[in-house]
Amino acid sequence: MPKELKVEASVRGKSGTGEARRLRHQGVIPAVVYNEKAQSQPIQLNAHDFSKILKGHGAGSVLLTLVVGGEEKKVLIREVQRHPVTDTILHVDFLEVSMTRKMRVEVPVRLAGEPVGVTMGGGVLQHLLRSVTIECLPGDLVEEVVVDVSGLQVGRTLMAGDLSLPVGLTLVTAKDVAVATVTEQREEEAAPSEAAEGAVAEPELVGKKKEEEEEEGSEKGEAQPAKEKESVEKKEAKK
Amino acid sequence: MALMPSRVKYRKVQRGSRAGLAWRGNTLSFGEYGLKALERGWVRGAVIEACRVAMNRHMKRKGKLWVRIFPDKPVTKKPIETRLGKGKGAPEYWVAVVRPGMMLFELDGVPEPLAKESLRLAATKLPIRTRFVSRRG
């Protein structure tokens, strides 16, 4: 069953960069809630409370109850914008959903167990697809799709079509997309030679060959007379 | 051999700007763990290669490593005891422009303590401050 979490929010009066910045300084996150009819409402949330709710949950696949001015709305998190360095939340997008209408959601894929190929075969487990798109009713939504990879051997790949989804969920992601694979351990790469390190090789220039050919052609015809002219001028100047 | 482009349009370029934050390439895209830049600077191709070698050696060829930066900017230098003028110097080395927030390396397929130590070894070789990050937060 999906976890239903309650988020308290209030209507945001002003909009714009300056106002959003002021809110963030006060520990408030600017956010927006919109529905499928493209009607949007700017709102604001308490940063501390929202961070606590978000921690430990797959951001896009949790059905939330958003309370805006006493009115309750069932929403999904569409986007969480974060600061590149501090990782603090800058802005949140909520999508209001209808409980009777199917929707498409990105659900994270979690790999469970240690593959045989890693424990016995000495391979390396690679998690290639971190989330899958599913179609379902909001009531059937799951927080994550757990896949048991303990039977995976070296050289074998688990495809999206192999995922066992709970009842009510339909896979939208192509079935032939690889989710996880166990590959052989790679050979140690040869250390670069010291001679090669010391020399600064230069890369090839784009369009250099053409230019060179053109230059060669022009030099034969023009370069010689130009040099002769220069030498004649110099002689005259000496006199 | 240090990293460098195979083909370029121009041999020499101007210094350019290092201003701003890394608004792209700042998240974990491939691996479970990563090393994030907290400062701005130029990272040489040889340094990136040294980091890669150190991490692979420490992980003993286990796991998978992604290098998210590439030195595509040539830096020139004039010979020593040369007077000013007479044109720009010859290309000396290649650098990657790193802005705060940029994900430099990513690791997967190894336990967290091993990944942490490997990325710490790489961080000691870099000319900028960095932070270890993981998907689990």
Image (cartoon, coloured by chain):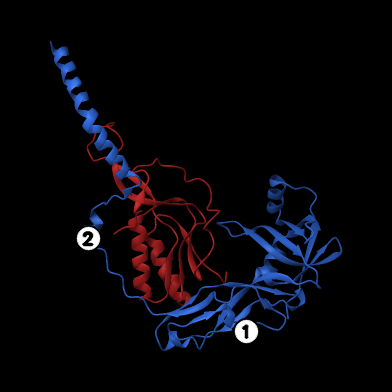
Dot label at residue A188? none
- Amino acid beneath label 1: Ser
**Residue labelled with disc 1:** A164
Few, some or many C-alpha atoms within 10 Å of disc 2 (few <14, some 14-19, many ≥20)? few
Which residue sits at x=39%, y=51%?
Answer: B72
Dot label at residue A194? 2
Chain letter for the residue marked with disc 1 in the picture: A
Give the chain ID for the blue colour.
A
- Amino acid beneath label 2: Glu
Q: Secondary structure at mark 1?
A: loop
Q: Secondary structure at mark 2?
A: helix
**Where residue A188 appears, x then y in whole percent?**
31, 73
Quote the CA–CA distance across marks 2 and 1.
53 Å
Question: In this view of the protein, which residue sits in the foreground, B79 or B71?
Answer: B71
Chain letter for the residue marked with disc 2 in the picture: A
Which residue sits at x=32%, y=57%?
Answer: B46
Which residue sits at x=62%, y=84%?
Answer: A164
